[in-house]
């Protein structure tokens, strides 16, 4: 029987959760200044060389009022020449929020988020994208509050009122918890998601679309988690599951493919068309090379705590 991983040591037996045993906040949130070296991907010039435009990347600190030290850091990627919708007209705009695992961080599995955010913001109708850290990693209640606070921030400041949520590992729990309770979430995607604290939310998600990615060689989170979530979503909506044969917890062997799938899924949710030209010039452009991925994950905080590449 699969067990719940709650200790402070990594386990070699795949589990169903990396949630902390205690929900009490510990320590202080990380400062955005700790992540200055991963503000942008190392080869962003490859994207700007073909598109001749560059998204704006803003370090942000978002207030969250549910506990002391109520702020959460992240990077907001805004499309070139972005203009907020007219508040007096019915005009919906979509943002993506990218959420990491049990240790927090801002680069995501195999540093996918680092390049994915730039690509989404550079599409023809650019999609604002937030790479969000956690204040208190693996504490579900506080992480859910972080997501709600970021949605409020994006809506209040930029008029963004529809959201696609993406979560890695533990991050799948707040993704589905928020989506199950808030209709502003129009789609969800996860990489190697846990099931604990995610099951109730995913049952309420349909017919809004979901994309579940998992490696069959994952030694941290059982691939059975994706299969269970897929079944819990039901048959009345748009569900997709991709199992990568033999790949690990961060999909290191298929990072480029996973990133492209996430990019096109989010664009589709947002109603942004990706033609062959955009696919070639934006979606398929490699902004992080294979040998750089693990180092960037470490610098971006995504290998802290219980989260492991394998």
Image (cartoon, rainbow, N blue to C red):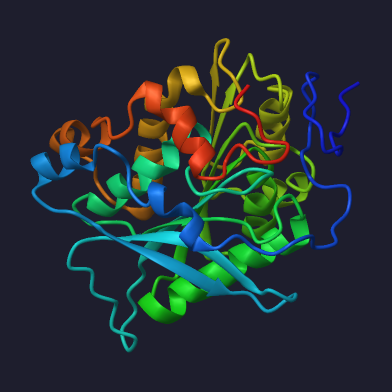
Residue 29 lies left or right of residue 269; in this view the side is right
Residue 130 lies left or right of residue 82; in this view the side is right
Where residue 5 appears, as percent x and y from the top left, is: 84, 34
Residue 108 in view here: no
Where residue 90 appears, as percent x and y from the top left, is: 34, 79
Q: Quadrant of residue 3?
A: top right
Location of the N terminus by quadrant is top right
Where residue 129 appears, as percent x and y from the top left, is: 39, 56
Residue 80 lies left or right of residue 170; in this view the side is left
Residue 216 in view here: yes
Residue 220 lies left or right of residue 246; in this view the side is right
Which residue corresponds to the image point at 23% horizontal and 49% vertical from the top-left?
Answer: 123
Q: Above or below — where is 86 with respect to 218?
A: below
> Total marks drawn?
0
Where residue 16 appears, as percent x and y from the top left, is: 79, 32
Closer to the camera, 194 or 63? Answer: 63
The residue furthest bottom is: 88
Q: Above or below — where is 128 with respect to 227?
A: below
Which residue corresponds to the image point at 40% horizontal and 79% vertical from the top-left?
Answer: 157
The residue furthest top is: 246
Which residue corresponds to the image point at 56% horizontal and 48% vertical from the top-left?
Answer: 105
Which residue corresponds to the image point at 76% horizontal and 44% vertical from the top-left?
Answer: 199
Closer to the camera, 29 or 287? Answer: 29
Location of the C terminus by quadrant is top right
The residue furthest right is: 1
Closer to the camera, 90 or 281? Answer: 281
């Amino acid at each position: 029987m699969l067990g719940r991983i709650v200790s402070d040591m990594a386990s070699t037996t795949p589990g169903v959760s990396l949630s902390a045993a205690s929900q009490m906040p510990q320590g202080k949130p990380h400062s955005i200044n700790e992540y200055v070296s991963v503000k942008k991907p190392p080869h962003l010039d490859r994207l700007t060389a073909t598109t001749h435009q560059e998204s704006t990347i803003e370090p942000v600190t978002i207030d969250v009022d549910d506990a002391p030290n109520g702020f959460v850091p992240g990077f907001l990627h805004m499309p070139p020449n972005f203009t907020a919708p007219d508040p007096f007209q019915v005009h919906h705009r979509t943002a993506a929020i990218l959420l990491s695992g049990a240790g927090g961080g801002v680069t995501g599995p195999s540093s996918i988020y680092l390049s994915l955010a730039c690509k989404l913001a550079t599409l023809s109708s650019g999609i604002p994208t937030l790479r969000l850290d956690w204040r208190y990693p693996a504490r579900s209640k506080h992480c859910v509050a972080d997501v709600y606070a970021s949605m409020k921030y994006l809506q209040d400041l930029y008029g963004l009122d529809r959201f696609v949520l993406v979560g890695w590992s533990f991050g799948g729990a707040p993704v589905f918890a928020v989506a199950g309770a808030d209709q502003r979430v129009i789609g969800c995607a996860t990489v190697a998601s846990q099931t604990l604290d995610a099951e109730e939310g995913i049952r309420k998600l349909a017919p809004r679309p979901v994309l579940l990615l998992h490696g069959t060689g994952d030694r941290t989170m059982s691939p059975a988690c994706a299969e269970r979530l897929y079944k819990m979503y039901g048959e009345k909506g748009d569900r997709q599951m991709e199992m990568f044969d033999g790949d690990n917890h961060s999909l290191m062997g298929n990072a480029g493919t996973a990133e492209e799938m996430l990019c096109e899924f989010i664009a589709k949710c947002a109603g942004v068309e990706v033609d062959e030209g955009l696919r070639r010039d934006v979606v398929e452009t490699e902004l992080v090379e294979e040998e750089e991925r693990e180092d960037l994950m470490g610098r971006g905080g995504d290998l802290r705590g219980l989260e492991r590449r394998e």
